[in-house]
Amino acid sequence: MTTSIHARYIRQSVLEDLLERMVFVGGPRQVGKTTFALSLLSEPTVRNPAYLNWDDVRSRASLMRGELPPDQPLVVLDEIHKFARWRNLVKGFFDMQRGERSFLVVGSARLDYYRRGGDSLQGRYHYHRLHPFSLPELDPECGREALDLLFEMGGFPEPLFRGDARFWRRWQRERTQRVIYDDLRNLENVREISLLELLAAELPVRVGAPISVKNLRDILEVAHETAERWLTIFERLYFCFRIPPFGTKKIRAVKKEQKLYLWDWSLVQDRGARFENLVASHLLKYCHLVEDTEGWAMDLRYIRDTDSREVDFVVLKDSKPLFAVECKVGERNISKAIPYFAERTPIPRFFQVHMGHADYEKAGVRVLPFATFCREMELV
């Protein structure tokens, strides 16, 4: 494997966007946003005067006084969205310094959501979402060793590159605690922290299945609106994501049930569900990259009808399906749902991916190893 934690896949697009606007980079806690941002500076360390972190008292004081480091063509503002009035502050910096310096804003939350309200920043920034390492990013050859490592350790840089199970367990516990006790408390008005811990522990066993908010409501003993709000908060903090169903006139598709996945698939104990989550994360990363860099409206969905026939994923571009993907642990048997939906939907291509070695086509369905799929579809 030949990869660098610094030369992440969005680097060139971010550098190009910085020439004309601010750039916001959001993503999960500890996905490597700060490391990536520092790599764009002449001295890639937190001691660089161009790096200002809201959690640092000195940086915070300078920002509140409206002071920026002199002679720095690029300024990195880290976690500044924790300041309630950060939108106006950043807008003022950009409007006064436009053409003289660039601004990169990073944070462990959906900055596109937390920018809303007050003075609009519309037209002043481009937004990029930084994902965990995927197979093609970790190893352009998509080798088996890299896939096995990703499957076991997840795509977050620290545990991935350490490759140590003990370190992974400790890191996981600490990261979840910080998401709940630091990020969530800083950004949302939530008092029932212990119940949010219970929700976070409950989500990994629900990966790959339609998520029932009613069921979560009963487990947590809270109102339906509260359970839904908490799920949405976890989505805003890049802890989990949900995908809606895809339907056409010729199938009796479910309409409201969403499937749930985690940004860190290594938390999922069931190996079949973990593999499905890994594939979901790769496809979401592909959709987000195309959307953030090329402007197309991308969407990741799944197909399920009222008779429980299902195909795991459909990728859409400007509301038109590009391809569908089914995940299977085995290599031989093609899902019976694929030919059924192939006849009744406008989806042009169907793939069935697995972690084995078989690669063949039958009845118009390509069955292939996931690594081969990544290479041929040019995923990132």
Image (cartoon, helix red, strand yellow):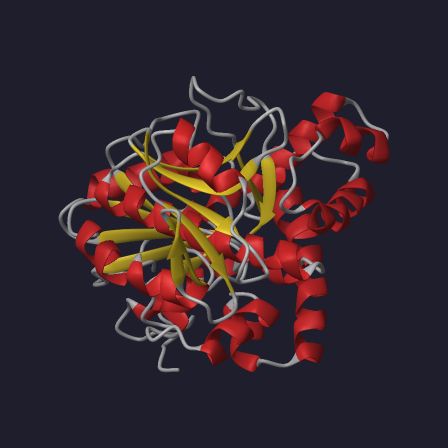
From this view, report whether residue 72 is shown above or below residue 189: below
Q: Quadrant of residue 217?
A: top right
Q: In which quarter of the image is the N terminus?
A: bottom left
The residue lying at 62 percent from left, 58 percent from top is 274
Q: Is residue 105 visible?
A: yes
User: Residue 375 or 235: which is nearer the viewer?
Assistant: 375
Left or right placement of residue 286 versus residue 268 in this view = left
Q: Which residue lies furthest to the left in this view?
A: 99
Q: Residue furthest top?
A: 249
Q: Quadrant of residue 369?
A: bottom left
Q: Quadrant of the C terminus?
A: bottom left
User: Residue 149 or 107: which is nearer the viewer?
Assistant: 149
The residue lying at 56 percent from left, 66 percent from top is 154
Q: Residue furthest front?
A: 363
| Residue 375 rendering spot, x and y as whole percentages | 32, 65
| Residue 120 rendering spot, x and y as whole percentages | 34, 27
The residue lying at 25 percent from left, 59 percent from top is 74
Q: Can residue 134 be seen in this view?
A: no
| Residue 150 rendering spot, x and y as whole percentages | 53, 70
| Residue 63 rendering spot, x and y as whole percentages | 41, 50
User: Residue 336 or 39: which is nearer the viewer?
Assistant: 336
From this view, report whether residue 331 is shown above or below residue 122: below
